[in-house]
Amino acid sequence: MELKLKVLHLSSEKTWRGGEQQIAYLIDELNAMGIENLVAARTDSAFEKYCTSKSISVKVFPFKNSFDLSTALGIKDLCKKEKVDIIHMHSSKSHGIGVLSAVLGNKVPLILSRRVDFVPKQNMLTRWKYNHSAIKRIVGVSDKITSIMKHYVKDPSLCVTVHSGVDLNKFNHQQRTENSLRKEFGIDSRTRLIGNTSALEAHKDYFTFIETIKKLADDGVPLQALIIGEGSLKTQLQEFVKEKELTNKVIFTGFRKDITRILPDLDVFLMTSNEEGLGTSVLDAFLAKVPVVATAAGGIPEMVIHEQTGMLAPIGDSRALAGHIKRIFSDDALRGSVVNGASQKVASSFSKEMTAKKTLAVYREVLGTL
């Protein structure tokens, strides 16, 4: 008889970013496989609104901090009431809440998703939180993260990789000749469009992105750069653009909800992160058939294979990045090859269906060993 499961997903974040999209994909695919999913979301969060709109069973909690006693008690009570089989913690704050619920007597096994590629803090509290006996698996979204965690926790066998996935049909209905960005910003057809859709935060290293644009502009490449997103560094980045005398070359579009419409308009997707758990925006570019030039940060090399699925440069190396972009612009055969290779890579290894199947296998393995 097939094991029936009821999974409680902890979503502690207020805003919607890549992690929340991954939870949404996972729940959608697990539902299709007959798994019952519940969500504990932060009150008035984007994910609460998403669950309500999709008729996903959701309960709201404050998630004030990583050791919010009232939320942890609420999670414990919810698990008992709903007879939950697995708790899946999807963020650092939900990690703390899940462990605290275990300390308070919750017997439901914990699964932790790890989406960032830096080593956790070395203090006693953090080490205790990661090594708590209630945690049965730590799921890294890249091999890079899994390797880091295997060296951090006491039992490396608990660490496994399940790559994040994307909707392979996300861009299928879009017309490739729409040129939305060119029309919106009055950019002529001879100007090359280089963009990124990441949040404007430190680990995305948009300063290297801007330095790369500066080198290309100084070399006479006709280009327009588009920074598509919002974040805490927006003002600093705008000042840096002025300092580099690139005001007419860099457009800050702000946050956009029409990525599937505008992303295919780019001539190059430039990813300059200095840390990256995986970077699913790269997978979106693969799907949109936009060639990717990226730094070899975190899990990016697991997607971007140099000269096969994209072009890779060392972290912070704007000169190498600029050189790769010029090759993409001047070599049609290389451009076609990496775009085709990227399409095959995402289809074979990074679908949301595959992510859900591998995650479900982790759930069943854990429950089968208890």
Image: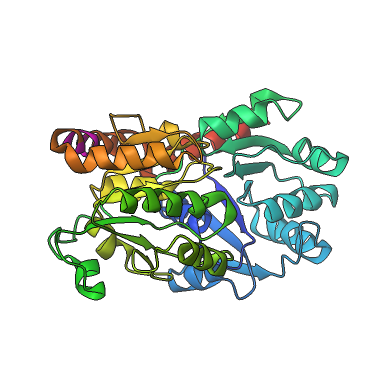
Q: Horizontally, is 296 left or right of 182 in the view?
A: right
Residue 36 on image: x %, y % = 51, 53
Residue at image coords 57%, 64%: 233
Span of residues in magenta: 335-340
How many numbered marks are there? 0
Is 255 colored magenta in this rendering? no
| Residue 305, placed above or below residue 125 | above
| Residue 260, placed above or below residue 152 | below
What is the magenta segment's predominant secondary structure? helix
Residue at image coords 35%, 30%: 305
Q: Horizontally, is 144 left or right of 217 in the view?
A: right
Residue 179 falls in image quadrant:
bottom left
Residue 319 falls in image quadrant:
top left
Whether residue 368 is visible here, answered yes or no, is no
Name the image colouring: rainbow
Given residues 126 and 48, the one toward you in this image is 126
Residue 97 on image: x %, y % = 75, 55
Q: Horizontally, is 247 left or right of 143 in the view?
A: left
Residue at image coords 24%, 74%: 184
Residue 109 on image: x %, y % = 69, 42
Whether residue 208 is visible here, answered yes or no, is yes
| Residue 256, placed above or below residue 287 | below
Given residues 252 and 73, the one toward you in this image is 252
Given residues 202 and 188, the one toward you in this image is 188
Quadrant where the C terminus lies? top right
Residue at image coords 75%, 39%: 130
Given residues 222 and 285, the one toward you in this image is 222
